Image (cartoon, rainbow, N blue to C red):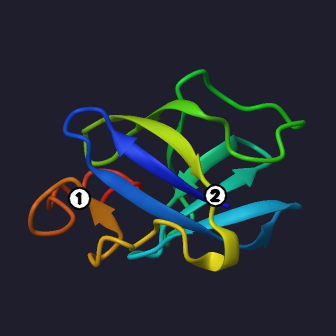
Amino acid sequence: MSIEFVRRLDGLVYHFRADGVFNGRPSYRRVDLDVWCRWLPERGWCTVGADGVANSGPLAGRTGDQELIPPLGPWRSWKAGRSYLYDLRRVDDPGGSGTAGADGTDGTTGVTGGTGGTGVTGVTA
């Protein structure tokens, strides 16, 4: 299974693929950057940058210890004084092919020229 974050503002899609286990739960790595969607004991499900700092999470707040996979629905990002609303969706990815990167880009869709250049959140460039 893969996951995607879809930015509500403009429909930009960020693709994440399952990549091992972290804290006893699946870990998902963004296909074009060192950005992860992981479960952290102190925060629940969130995205983290290469520095390990959380920079987005489900809009409902901290997720419970019982959740074994990232919750569907709205997520809020925050970084560099900006915040965006995303929808997390799951993508069936049998054999690792799925849709992640299938558009021939660097793991994003919806914006001409790649990542959109915002650089404002762990689920964006």
Residue 86 coordinates in the image, percent (x, y) = 40, 36
Residue with the mark numbered 2: 92
Q: Residue 102 is drawn in which quadrant?
A: bottom left
Q: Report helix, strand or loop for mark 1.
A: loop
Q: Is residue 14 above or below residue 61?
A: below
Q: Residue furthest left?
A: 112
Residue at 83% from the left image edge and 46% from the top image edge: 68
Residue with the mark numbered 1: 119
Q: Residues within 10 Å of mark 2 (few under 14, many from 20)?
A: few
Residue type pointed to by label 2: Asp
Q: Is residue 83 above or below residue 38?
A: above
Q: Report helix, strand or loop for mark 2.
A: loop
Q: Residue furthest top?
A: 60
In the rendered structure, the answer to whether residue 87 lies left or right of residue 84 reads: right
Residue at 89% from the left image edge and 61% from the top image edge: 24
Residue 87 coordinates in the image, percent (x, y) = 45, 35
Q: Residue 65 is drawn in which quadrant?
A: top right
Distance between the Cα atoms at labels 2 and 1?
28 Å
Circle 2/circle 1 CB separation < 8 Å: no
Residue type pointed to by label 1: Gly
Residue at 44% from the left image edge and 47% from the top image edge: 5
**Who comes first in sequence, dot 2 or dot 1?**
2
Q: Nearer the viewer, residue 30 or 11?
A: 11
Q: Is residue 125 visible?
A: no
Residue 35 coordinates in the image, percent (x, y) = 48, 67
Can you tell which of label 2 and label 1 is closer to the viewer? Answer: 2
